[in-house]
Amino acid sequence: MELFKLFGTIAVNNMEAMSAIDETTNKAKSFSETMSDKFTSFGESATKLGTKMSLGLTTPIMLFGGKAIQATADFEYAMSEVAAISGATGDDLAALTNKAKEMGEKTKFSASESAEALKYMAMAGWKTNDMLSGIEGIMNLAAASGEDLASTSDIVTDAMTAFGMAADGTTKVIKDGIEKEVPNATYFADVLAATSSSANTNVSMLGETFKYCAPVAGALGFSLADTAEAAGLMANSGIKASQAGTTMRSLMTSLAGEVKFSSKAFGELEVQTKKSDGSMRPLNEIVEECRGAFSQMTDAEKSANAEALVGKNAMSGFLALMNAAPKDITKVHNAIAGADGAAASMAETMNDNLNGAVTILKSSLEGLGIELYEGMADPLKDAANQATEYEGQLTDAFKNGGLDGLVAEAGNILGEIVTKAAQLAPKVAKAAVSLVQSFVGGISKNSSALTSGAANMITALLSGIMGMLPDILSCAAELLISFASSMANQI
């Protein structure tokens, strides 16, 4: 009997032990599966992180490459238009191309936009040297006014032609008592910039004004400065753009004939508009003499005389000239008289800010992209031609030998590609060595700065760690207690 009790006790203990072992095994299995899931999740996260890091590095490179190719394509197309319109080839075309690139590097406008401006100059009949000397002034005017470069170029070239200002000519200017000659395009840009900054108008509106009155002004020999002054004074009275242009056209046409006024104050007065040789007197002299007569008239007489001279449609603009305040006349006149360098100065001011710096940076990056692309253009073209040749070989192989022929020819092509890659390997390795050497050299040149920077960084890091040390120790203690408690529960 005792023996049976002993066997029973042993069996019960064995069953309890087996049950404990099974339970421990299950928990171990559960723990293992949990850790496995954690490591799997960690691996997936690491893979995603690696993918993101790879994309973070390759995507900007691919985007820059794509932008470079697109920018170069746009630039090449624009310069092709310049060549087709102007007839420039060889050295002339190369000079224009280099000038457009130069403007793209040092101004807010890209090389492609510079090429677009050159196109409008070519359309106006400008020759290579004219474009080379004139583009900088036009670009300064566009930057100073905030107008589109192509439209600004169109305004300047059209108006210069209307005024009879030769693209290859120069204008004498006096500033600070010093006389010098500047290209006509630069002078024109300076006058428009000075007028827009001293009167209530802008370059675009002045362009509209000149569209209507510049041909007449040029035919009568009226100067750009006098015409711009009149346009600025009219603009101060709200008569701008095309309205000012049609008004001035009527006024100038009327001045070509007899100019007579009547008033109770002086009876009848004739203003001489021509010199003894038959040429027209300067516009400013004629207008100033008319002002003298109008200053003696009543309001009713002013209205009647203005209508008689220029007609109802243009009389408001003419009266704006007659009634202009002396201080406004002086302001606009002096600004135009001292306009030399106005466009460049205004452009510099407009770009002297973060937005201007970023714009110039973008323009410079396009220039870099164009240079990089042009450096790789021939190899890329060769690669494209080679790919076309390979495609033809594969097509012929499939036609003649079916799938087997295609596979065989593909193997030959792959072998050729690998061979060429092997031939290029030394060059690639040499380039890599040069890159490493340049990197090491750069580090060596700046070692003192790097050492100082690293020391400051380490000092700041250690200081921060020491300040956080009590919190770190407290957190670590809590983590250890939590970990020990969890392990005890699992066991």
Image (cartoon, helix red, strand yellow):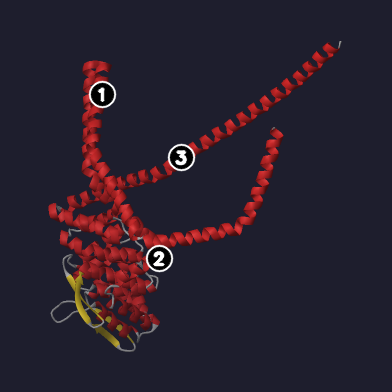
* Quarter in which the C terminus is drawn: top right
Q: Quadrant of residue 129?
A: bottom left
Question: Measured from the top left, where is residue 74 in percent x and y?
Answer: 28, 48
Quadrant of image for the N terminus: top right
Residue at image position (33%, 89%) is 265
Q: Check the image and name the residue furthest to the right.
A: 1
Mark 1 Cα-neighbour bin, 10 Å: few <14, some 14–19, many ≥20: few
- Does residue 226 appear left or right of residue 236 in this picture? left
Which residue is located at x 13 percent, y 79 percent?
277
Q: Which label lies toward us, 1 or 2? A: 1
* First in sequence: mark 1 vs mark 2: 2
Q: Earlier in the sequence, mark 3 or mark 1?
A: 3
Residue at the disc numbered 2: 353
Left or right of 46 in this view: 391: left
The residue at which mark 1 appears reads as 411
Position of residue 408 in the picture relative to residue 348 (left or right):
left
Q: Amino acid at mark 1?
A: Gly
Query: Is mark 3 in CB contact (under 8 Å) with mark 2?
Result: no
Q: Residue at x 22, y 64 (%)?
A: 134
